[in-house]
Amino acid sequence: MKLFLIQILLLVVLFPSVGYCQQPNWEEVAPGVWKGVIGNPEMLDFLTVAEPQPNIAALNKLPDENIPNQPQQLESTFQDNSLYLRFPLEKEEQLFGFGLNFQTIHQRGRILNLHVDHYGGKDNGRTHAPVPFYVSSRGYGVFINSARYLKIWAGTAVRKDSENPPTVYDRNTDKEWTSRPYSDAVEILVPAEGVEIYIFAGPTSLDVVRRYNLFMGGGCLPPRWGLGFTHRVHRLYSADDVKKEVEEFNSRDFPLDFIGLEPGWQSASYPCTFEWAPDRFPEPEKFVSELLKQGVRLNLWTNPYVSPESPIYDAMEKFTGSHTVWNGLVPDLYTKEAEEILMGQFTKSQIDIGVSGYKIDEVDGYDHYLWPDVATFPSGISAEQMRQTYGIKLQKMLADIYKEKNQRTYGLVRASNAGSSPMPFVLYNDYYNHEDFITALCNSSFSGLLWTPEARNSRSAEEWLRRMQSVCFSPMAMINAWSSGTKPWSFPEVADAVRDIAQLRMKLMPYFYSEFAKYHFEGTPPFRAMYLEPAFSHSIEKVSSSSNLEDNPYAEAITKEIKDQYMAGENLLVVPMFTGQTTRKVVLPEGKWFDFYTGEFAGEGEIITVEPGLEKIPVFVKDGGIVPMMKPRLRSPKSGEKVDIEIRHYGTKDGNYSLYDDDGETFNYEKGDYCWRQISIETQPSGDFIRNISSAKAGKPDNIGNITWKQMTIIK
């Protein structure tokens, strides 16, 4: 009886009755970042997994801001063994983020169940990276640091005591009636006893995203070769097949920086042995060495599930979960033993012989093959938390191995989550809708994620070229031919155009490498949605009303989404074309914009229609934009190799640009071994230009060779 009373007392203290409200004490934990704690947070969360190292110096360079008003008006209640959180929203306020969504940019008006999973065709929160972080158009962001399945009502529910209730309409007579009336709050259900909440200040949406990325340690800086071209070969290719493929790339003058091997490199897969197939790869060390001598890196596919045929099966068995995946053991990555066994196998048989990276597959779902939520693990971590963090944990483990070797890597992953900004991995999936891939590319920029709209196969030459154009303006320029065996030249009628766009990707490497450096040092996503462009309006066009009362999930505060164009770095506006399109509309932000290819004036803060032809993807450069480029080449520059640069200037305004330089391969930049070269172009009254690029500082990297200048816009 005494024990029972003690238990009841503890429940009263730890689990207050319904209606109990607790306000966190907000503490500024980094410049422009505030932390609040409610209840008793769990030991495992995203920050304990990712172990971020905030870049305080870079955060200090952002505008000094007070804690935003809206999110600190948080209401919290403990009910039904969960925390209920309510953040107020203002009229016309828009929401972005919540991870990797494929069909929607605007998230106000959506109900989401944030759950790591394969993407099933609907933006309902079950996705590859359901990051519990949202960005407001009012210039603040909110991060819920819980590795649980969170339920989000992002401005959908209406409380009877709302301070800003919706207008009451009569469905019988009022055309404005809607089944989804205006809501003035984001409501979140956290199935836990407590949680950490972080608020990120602006003042702009881009500043919010920068703060988030910098708080997580800054965005990843890939090796230069990671920004070259990659080709994933058929799943059953042998060493000889791969070498022939490389020879064909060379003979066709097609760029290739790294080859991806799919499941057949292993002696068995689904589940995996993590050892080389002796029939297809009899001499793996020699094979890897031969490719490296040609300047071609190797990336290996794997999933983490241990086959009974694997040499690590017996040692791993007692450090795995209660359930299997494809009859393979599921390593409990939160036990030191499982981590050491799995990473030890990767290191000794692959990384130590020169393998440059990995593709981590099948760590996202589906429910019917992944471990269920009733599974148990030796560490005591719940199956739910394991599901939410497994992808980010694997990324961290592999990234740490390469960092210990002072060797940068760049790979692929099927699941990620909060804290992944510094991780050198790009998301992908089995979904294959071109338009939705571009929406995902836009959405990734709100949540510290990278996404590739990879090309696999196509029904026509037109579709193949259009997909390749998008791929070459993304974080990873990749063909994934694991199933189809497709090659860049599989559609002969567009083979030359495909090679041209791949070579353009290589020419733009100085620009893209600099933009990734800004991602790392400044937090600015290298590929980002238009809504993060300072000169772009959040209110381009109101959504038209629908005759179907169930078709409008956005209510009256929402504007038309711009989800099929995006910014590539500081100066480039990319406008993908899709199969069947000969023309399309482009929404230009404020200021003058110029055609990337010709330098001609395109428009100024307006909606234009373009007709680029099949062989070009429309790209525009902002007024005064500077784009450094190099000559096309088959491989990315080696460490210490001098590269000639052409500096292009667009428009009529003066221009400034920061060009980044380091060795391109190691982490020596973390010790200060890097250089920013400042480029400036000033227009004189006579129409002439004063052009300048700063010299590399003594003792710093200096890989820039001869410099030429090209004025793309002729000033009359």
Image (spheres, rainbow, N blue to C red):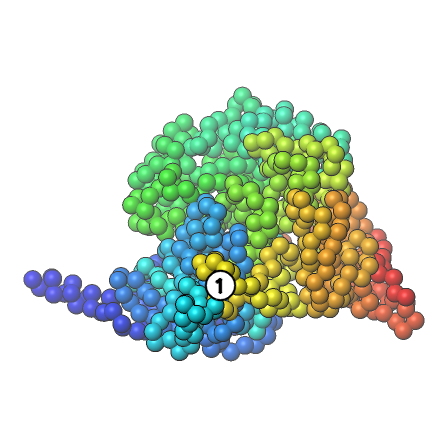
Q: Position of residue 224 (x, y in %)?
A: 67, 48
- Residue designated by label 1: 554
Q: Quadrant of residue 486?
A: top right
Q: Position of residue 347 (x, y in %)?
A: 51, 38
Neighbourhood count class around disc 1 (C-alpha, 10 Å): few under 14, some 14–19, many 20 upward: many
- The residue under the point 33% across, 41% down is 321
Q: Nearer the viewer, residue 590 or 452?
A: 590
Asked if residue 147 shows in the view, the reply is: no
Asked if residue 440 shows in the view, the reply is: yes
Judged from this view, the residue extending furthest toward the front is 173
- Figure disc tally: 1
Q: Nearer the viewer, residue 578 or 505?
A: 578
Q: Is residue 26 left or right of residue 592?
A: left
Q: Quadrant of residue 698?
A: bottom right
Q: Is residue 172 left or right of residue 426?
A: left
For the N terminus, the image quarter is bottom left
- The residue under the point 92% across, 71% down is 686
Q: Is residue 442 left or right of residue 630?
A: left
Q: Nearer the viewer, residue 424 or 254?
A: 254
- Position of residue 508 relative to residue 96, above or below, is above
Q: Position of residue 197 (x, y in %)?
A: 41, 67
For the C terminus, the image quarter is bottom right
- Position of residue 667 relative to residue 73, above or below, is above
Q: Amino acid at mark 1?
A: Tyr
Judged from this view, the residue extending furthest toward the top is 279
Task: Label 1, secondary structure: give it.
Answer: loop
Q: Is residue 404 left or right of residue 387?
A: right
